Amino acid sequence: MAVLNCVKPGAKKGQTILLVDLTTSGDSDAVMTTLQRLGYTPEIRHVSYKTGVHVLAVLKDEQHDGIPEDYLIDEWMQLRSEINPDAVHLWYGK
């Protein structure tokens, strides 16, 4: 059995993370199929919240010195139109 990477909610300074929370997304198999159809190769990680452990499909995890305020917004909006919008997150580390 593979050990999942544990991450903290949010992003570190300069980090940008685009992800889908599979715990809250609904049918995980259908979501993963949709993500692959859209060209993503998700990396599965988990995060421990006070309410329990959530499984995340991390689509992008990048480090930048400076990024535009609207970076990845178009991708985030497209994902929210195809997947439960409450499960799609875009974290910027400031």
Image (cartoon, grey):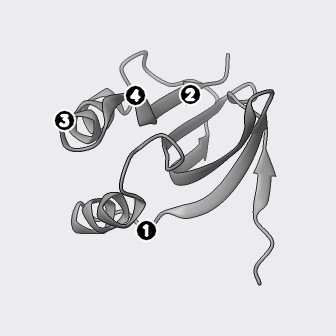
Residue identified by numbered label 1 = 41
Residue in the image at 66% along x and 23% along y: 93
1 and 4 marks in contact (CB < 8 Å): no
Q: In which quadrant of the rendered image does the N terminus lie?
A: bottom right
3 and 1 marks in contact (CB < 8 Å): no
- Which residue is more in the foreground, 2 or 69? 2
Disc 2 residue type?
Answer: Trp
On screen, 31 above or below 10? below
The image quadrant that residue 36 belongs to is: bottom left
Q: Nearer the viewer, mark 2 or mark 4?
A: 4
Residue identified by numbered label 3 = 81
Secondary structure of the residue carrying numbered label 1: loop
Distance from the alpha carbon under mark 3 to that under mark 2: 18 Å
* Crowding at mark 4 (Cα within 10 Å: few <14, some 14-19, many 20+): few
Distance from the alpha carbon under mark 3 to that under mark 1: 19 Å
* Label ID, residue 86: 4
Disc 3 residue type?
Answer: Ser
On screen, 81 above or below 23? above
Distance from the alpha carbon under mark 4 to that under mark 3: 11 Å
Residue identified by numbered label 2 = 91
Distance from the alpha carbon under mark 1 to that under mark 4: 21 Å
Secondary structure of the residue carrying numbered label 4: helix
